[in-house]
Amino acid sequence: MPGKEPDRSKEPDRSKERIVSLAAPPPVLSARGQRKEYGTGEGLVRAVDGVDLDVGAGETVAITGPSGCGKSTLLHLLGGLDRPSGGEVRLNGRRIDDLGEKALARVRRTEVAYVFQSFHLLEELTAVENVELPALLAGRSPRSARRRALDLLDRLGLAGRARHLPSALSGGQRQRVAVARALSNEPLAVLADEPTGNLDSAATADVLRLFAELRDAGQTLVIVTHDPRVAAAADRAFSMRDGVLAGESGPAGPACGRLAGAEG
Ligand SMILES: Nc1ncnc2c1ncn2[C@@H]1O[C@H](COP(=O)(O)OP(=O)(O)OP(=O)(O)O)[C@@H](O)[C@H]1O
Ligand SMILES: [Mg+2]
């Protein structure tokens, strides 16, 4: 009808959306002035020497750099596996570097997850038992832990290997079991230290595909790697030198070549 006021009551309230989008959530992981020193005097090693890093929700960040530049040390600090000599680490806005042992152990058990170069699977447990272990330790019922473990193995293409011992699995399959285990408690962030370091190129491609899927599913990831392909697949890649994050590059283009060429 001409002249009739349109009914605005059913339209979404855009002013609220603006407020929501302006109040951005804190980064999942945030490090400020991270330092880690070992030894004293002549023997002092500045393994991590003043690192600032924010990792947003769903972001994949890669860290490359020569051996001994501090990559693993930094990853340990980010995941509460080790305490910094100085600086702050926040997980979803909450400081974790100053937590007591018990609270920090809880963070390590339930909020962040590690994937290591050498898999770190328990050899006497089957694949599904390895995957369900973190959920059991976090207090889930055996039935729900088992169901989730089988589901994860299925999603990672290992349904047929659930009852195998690690010794009966290939390197790529072991690493996929290790990733499934890392996802067991739906961690805020997965921290991976050279996850393809022990794998041949076919298995590396497998694990790379898996990380791409995790990224698409919105999993926050920090990956330390010597492999330029892993760095190239990340949203952001940093190169580390002497305990410092030296440079950042985006996912594609010549910067990745520079990273690859700069490998030590
Ligand atoms: N527990 C420790 N005690 C003394 N020095 C250490 C300790 N852990 C690491 N470092 C030293 O800190 C520096 C950084 O080590 P880190 O393991 O973080 O290097 P990285 O970049 O991970 O190397 P790689 O690529 O070989 O794994 C090295 O000089 C190392 O020798
Ligand atoms: Mg290392």
Image: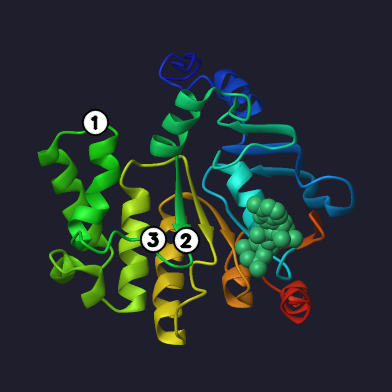
Residues at discs 1 and 2 in contact (Cβ within 8 Å): no
Residue projecting furthest to the left = 143
Q: Quadrant of residue 126?
A: bottom left
Q: Nearer the viewer, residue 86 or 28?
A: 86
Q: Amino acid at mark 1?
A: Gly
Which mark, by number, is residue 170? none
Under circle 2, the secondary element is strand
Whether label 1 lies within 8 Å of ligand 1 gets the answer: no
On the image, the x and y values in percent for residue 207 come to: 42, 71
Which residue was labeled with disc 2?
116
Q: Quadrant of residue 237?
A: bottom right
Badge 1, how many Cα within 10 Å: few under 14, some, many 20+? few
Residue at 27% over, 37% down: 137
Calculate the distance from the C-alpha at mark 1 to the C-alpha at mark 2.
24 Å
Which residue was labeled with disc 1?
139
Q: Is residue 119 above or below residue 101?
A: below
* Residue 210 in the figure: left or right of residue 247: left
